[in-house]
Every structure is written in C-alpha cells, then in structure tokens.
C-alpha cells in the first residue's frame, strides 16, 4: 500500500506562485499606449505638437526633423500607430515622399501634416495611401481626436477640404448650409454620434444637436439618418 502524500505544502507553493505572477501581470497590463512619430523640420511646430500629445499620458511621441531621420527611426524602433509627415520638410518633395514612405514601410500608417499645401492635396494624399491629412491650423483637441481616429485605422480629412479645388464649389446642398453645418453633416455621413462630432470639432454636444436640427430643417430631412442619405445621394461627400 502506497503511503499517503501531503499536498498541503505543494498547494501552498502553487498558490503563492499564482498570487505573485497574477500581481505581476496586473502591474504589467496598464493602459494601451499610442505610439506616434512626428517628422517636421519646423522645431517649434514639431515640439509644440509633441508636448501636447505627450501630456495626454497614453501617447508616446518620437520626433524627427526630416524624412531620412524618420526612416531611420522606423527601421530601429519598428511600427508606430501613426507617423505624421510634414508635406514640405527635407526629403519629402510633397507626395513623392509619401509614396517612398508607403513603399518602404507598407504596413506603417502615415498621415500628412501641412500648413501650406493646396486643399486638393488632402484627397490626393489619401489616394496615395495616407490615412489622412492634418492642417497645422487645426485646434489642439481636434488634432488629437483626428490622430486617435487615424491610429484606430480610420481615414480622416477635414470637412472643409473634402472637395477638390477643381470641383464645382456651388453644390446645391452646400449653398443651403453654413460651413459648420456641412462639417456636422459630414460627421453624420460617417456614422458619428453627436458626442463624437463634438469632440472632433471641439464643440459642446448641445451645439451639435442644434446644428443637426437646423441642417435637417434646411434640407428637409426627417432625421439625422435621412440627412446623411440625402447628402450621400446628392454626392456632397
């Protein structure tokens, strides 16, 4: 007959091991950090954006002053959640630099950052593979929301840049709405809630509700869903 074995000490050791490693796992599993690389030769712009994003706590920012430096960082540090490329910095040559970037790092999301490119560049950049286009004139909160939006895999172009300079500016619906109402309507077409549109435009949610009500009345829409359908069928966005 086999002598009975005392598992109490073994069980105690297992429990202690589980407790220690569970505690370690909890400590290591913190909030998800968004990694952003900003490549811009204008130090003040680059550092200001970097400082604001870093202040969020869950954003880790790395900077570069030209395209070649950005390439070296990507080579050494791997994939970022988003890379912002200044349209006119050394090495870019406009959209040619974007094409070089996407060819060299095909799995890396890129976006264009610019203060002087013509409006049509926004759509051209997206057509060339960018996740979006950010004017340097954007407000800080709007910029942050747009970066988070693109880092999540969505495409972003400011509503007022959606239409190419070569297109007819006097769209029937556009002539009925204010520029802010058009921005709100664009959000509706993308399926955003009032709260999400408010964040994107840096406005109060109650203000968005008023804009939705007004634009629905102007274009004779029954509700927000109907308004989005009217805009899409008319080819506004």
Image: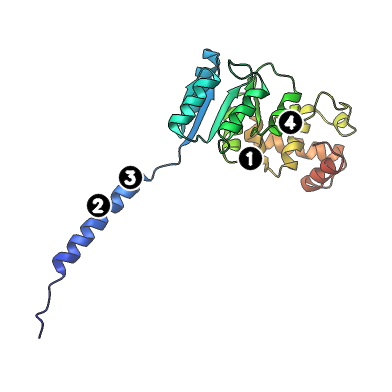
Residue contact between numbered discs 2 and 1, judged by CB atoms under 8 Å: no
State how far apart marks 2 and 1 are (Cα): 40 Å
Q: Depth check: 111 or 34 in front?
A: 111
Closer to the camera: disc 2 or disc 1?
1
Using a 10 Å C-alpha cutoff, classify the residue at mark 1 as few (fewer than 14 neighbours), some (14 to 19) or many (20 or more): few
Q: State the residue position of label 2.
A: 20
Residue 53 shows in the view: yes
Q: State the residue position of label 3.
A: 27
State how far apart marks 1 and 4 are (Cα): 15 Å
Q: State the residue position of label 1.
A: 154
Element assignment for label 2: helix
- Percent across and percent down for residue 8 are 15, 68
Residue 55 shows in the view: no
**As drawn, is 214 to the left or to the right of 22?**
right
At 76% across and 35% down in the image, what residue appears? 211
State how far apart marks 3 and 1 are (Cα): 31 Å
Q: State the residue position of label 4.
A: 159
Of mark 2 and mark 1, the one earlier in the sequence is 2
Of mark 3 and mark 2, the one earlier in the sequence is 2
At 66% across and 31% down in the image, what residue appears? 201
Closer to the camera: disc 3 or disc 1?
1
């Amino acid at each position: 007959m086999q002598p009975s074995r005392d598992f109490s000490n073994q069980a105690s050791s297992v429990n202690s091991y589980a407790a220690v490693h569970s505690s370690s796992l909890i400590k290591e599993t913190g909030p998800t950090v968004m990694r952003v690389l900003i490549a811009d030769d204008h130090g003040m712009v680059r550092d200001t954006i970097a400082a604001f994003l870093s202040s969020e706590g869950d954003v880790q920012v790395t900077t570069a002053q030209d395209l070649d430096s950005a390439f070296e960082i990507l080579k050494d540090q791997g994939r970022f959640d988003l890379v912002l490329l200044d349209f006119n910095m050394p090495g870019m040559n406009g959209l040619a630099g974007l094409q070089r970037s996407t060819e060299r790092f095909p799995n890396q999301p890129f976006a264009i950052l610019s203060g002087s490119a013509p409006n049509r560049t926004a759509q051209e950049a997206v057509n060339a593979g960018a996740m979006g286009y950010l004017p340097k004139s954007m407000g800080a909160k709007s910029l942050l929301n747009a970066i988070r939006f693109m880092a999540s895999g969505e495409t972003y172009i400011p509503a007022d840049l959606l239409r190419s300079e070569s297109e007819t500016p006097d769209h029937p619906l556009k002539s009925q709405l204010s520029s802010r109402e058009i921005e709100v309507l664009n959000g509706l077409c993308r399926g955003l809630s009032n709260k999400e549109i408010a964040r994107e435009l840096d406005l109060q949610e109650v203000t968005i509700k008023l804009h939705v009500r007004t634009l629905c009345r102007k274009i004779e829409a029954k509700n927000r869903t109907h308004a989005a359908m009217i805009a899409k069928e008319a080819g506004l966005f």
